[in-house]
Amino acid sequence: MIKTLVLVAQVIWTVVVVGAATLMGAVLGFGCYGWIGAIALGTAGFGLGSLLAAFPEVLLELLGAM
């Protein structure tokens, strides 16, 4: 039961972090550079979001330093 809850929390964390990073990259890219920028920065946001989702302590430390 506990393993299932941990797995569900990890999946939700990953989807939220990767989705937010991808969306932020796409919005910033579209605002500054148009469609090509949205695709490029959305892809970069996806990569950064994947890294932050894999290592949540890094993201939490960055948010705590702000």
Image: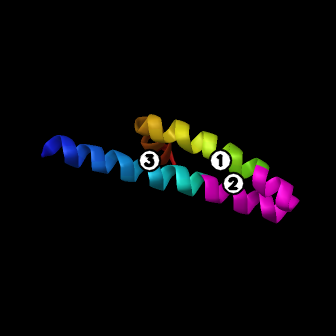
Dot 1 or dot 3: first in sequence order is 3
Which residue occupies 71% across, 58% down? Answer: 26
Which residue occupies 44% across, 34% down? Answer: 55
Per the rendering, the mark at residue 14 is 3
How far apart are the alpha carbons under marks 2 and 1? Answer: 5 Å
Q: Position of residue 34 (x, y in %)?
A: 86, 62
Q: Is residue 34 left or right of residue 11?
A: right
| Three-letter amino acid code at the position of disc 1 | Gly
| Three-letter amino acid code at the position of disc 2 | Gly
Asked whether residue 25 is drawn in magenta, I would say yes
Query: Which segment did they paint magenta?
Result: 22-39
Which residue occupies 49% across, 51% down? Answer: 17
Q: Mark 1–mark 3 contact, CB under 8 Å?
A: no
Most foreground residue, 16 or 59: 16
Depicted 27 relative to depicted 9: above or below: below
Tell me how many marks there are. Answer: 3
Dot 2 or dot 1: first in sequence order is 2
Residue tagged by mark 2? 25
Which residue occupies 21% across, 45% down? Answer: 4
Secondary structure, magenta segment, majority class:
helix
Label 3: element kind: helix
How far apart are the alpha carbons under marks 1 and 3? Answer: 13 Å
Label 1: element kind: helix
| Three-letter amino acid code at the position of disc 3 | Thr
How far apart are the alpha carbons under marks 3 and 2? Answer: 16 Å
Q: Is residue 44 left or right of residue 37?
A: left
Residue tagged by mark 1? 45
Label 2: element kind: helix
Q: Mark 2–mark 1 contact, CB under 8 Å?
A: yes
